[in-house]
């Protein structure tokens, strides 16, 4: 593919190339790019097109340009200053093969359109130059908690095999608006079964998930409506509720994953009438998602969200060590921001 650098584009500009698949032919350029950039609002996307969108021959492209199948859209952008992220990453466990860390909320795991340098792996590599480091799994940027990193190619392959075979027990803690209601499972066309072994207030919820084609944000999931939806099941236990003036109570919910689908806990809880506090995508208004990604949350948004990040924490991982075959449990303490929020709420209305 021969690329012509447009006149006036500096040598240091960052180039991103997007191929148009046949099924998206005919879309407006701004609509197409918003789908590719995913976490960007329509207004922000139109600005990006205006200042940086070109064709292969260096020709400028406009927002109303209709993309063609197999066309290549080029974004030439000046290097941007990345948003500061937390870089204090406590080590929870380490041996010759694995590293378990307590990922802080706000630190991305993977590079994205906004975060190239400020990622978990880059933070760790800066502390451990020359060491092999590979993510065993992922957490959303706003989710805090336990994350496993492999320290050699052999342990990386072995760890991924454990994960593929669902050999890891994953436990999360969530703070929610409202108490998850198993009775809502009927409306959600899901299956609920009691989990008496997990104690009072515990139940298992099963409902498939799929990408939401009706959402402007191409990362949003919904309850499955097609035969291609992926099975998903979560075990919930309401540990405590606290009063909330004029509304459903807040709840602290223990969530145990039986499957690991994208946004599984967040979608399941929202469908049960208990979205996670601070959730910009599945909470009170999904348009908060794009404004949050663009750093443009309003005062009204912040009041409605109550927290600047969603209140979800990966509290515990339990699995058989892929190299030593010994049982391994790694736990991350409940983070101070969520603890302070919980303690600041009204008087406890008791355990489940």
Image: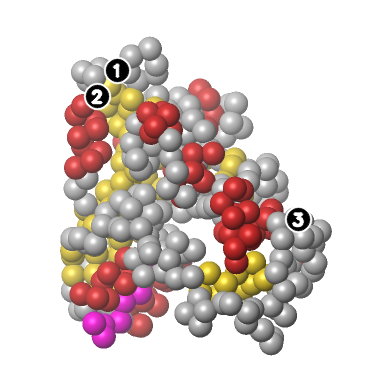
Q: Secondary structure at mark 1?
A: loop
The residue furthest top is: 246
Is residue 269 at least partly visible in the picture?
no
Residue that carries the numbered disc 2 in the rendered image = 345
Quadrant assignment, res 1: bottom right
* Magenta region: 129-136
- The percent coordinates of residue 326 (x first, y second) are 23, 68
The first of marks 3 and 2 along the sequence is 3
In-image side of 120 versus 21 (left or right): left
- The percent coordinates of residue 249 (x first, y second) are 35, 20
* Callout 1 crowding tier (Cα within 10 Å): few <14, some 14–19, many ≥20: some
Single out the mark in the foreground, 3 or 1. Answer: 3
* Callout 3 crowding tier (Cα within 10 Å): few <14, some 14–19, many ≥20: few
Q: CA distance from mark 3 to mark 1?
A: 50 Å
- Residue at image position (76%, 73%) is 70
Q: CA distance from mark 1 to mark 2?
A: 8 Å
Callout 1–callout 2 Cβ contact below 8 Å? yes
């Amino acid at each position: 593919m021969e690329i012509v650098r447009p006149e006036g584009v500096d040598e240091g500009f960052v180039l991103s190339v997007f191929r148009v698949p046949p099924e998206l032919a005919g879309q407006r350029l701004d609509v197409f790019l918003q789908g590719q950039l995913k976490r960007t609002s329509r207004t922000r996307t139109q600005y990006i097109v205006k200042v940086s969108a070109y064709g292969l021959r260096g020709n400028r492209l406009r927002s109303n340009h209709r993309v063609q199948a197999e066309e290549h859209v080029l974004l030439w952008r000046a290097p941007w200053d990345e948003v500061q992220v937390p870089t204090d990453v406590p080590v929870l466990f380490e041996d010759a093969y694995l590293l378990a860390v307590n990922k802080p909320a706000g630190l991305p795991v993977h590079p994205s359109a906004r975060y190239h340098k400020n990622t978990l792996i880059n933070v760790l590599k800066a502390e451990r130059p020359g060491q092999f480091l590979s993510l065993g799994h992922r957490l959303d940027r706003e989710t805090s908690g336990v994350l496993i990193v492999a320290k050699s190619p052999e342990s990386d392959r072995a760890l991924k095999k454990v994960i593929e075979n669902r050999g890891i027990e994953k436990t999360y803690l969530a703070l929610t608006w409202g108490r998850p209601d198993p009775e809502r499972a009927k409306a959600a066309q899901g299956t609920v079964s009691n989990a008496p072994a997990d104690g009072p207030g515990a139940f298992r919820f099963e409902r498939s998930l799929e990408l939401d084609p009706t959402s402007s944000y191409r990362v949003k999931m919904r309850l499955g409506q097609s035969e291609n939806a992926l099975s998903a099941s979560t075990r919930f236990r309401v540990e405590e509720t606290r009063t909330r003036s004029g509304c459903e109570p807040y709840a602290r919910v223990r969530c145990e994953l039986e499957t690991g689908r994208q946004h599984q806990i967040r979608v399941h809880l929202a469908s049960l009438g208990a979205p996670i506090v601070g959730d910009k995508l599945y909470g009170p208004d999904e348009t908060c998602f794009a404004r949050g990604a663009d750093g443009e949350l309003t005062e009204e948004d912040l009041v409605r969200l109550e927290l600047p990040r969603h209140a979800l924490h990966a509290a515990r991982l339990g699995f058989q060590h892929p190299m030593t075959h010994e049982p391994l449990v790694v736990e991350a303490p409940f983070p101070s921001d969520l603890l302070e929020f919980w303690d600041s709420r009204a008087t406890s209305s008791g355990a489940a």
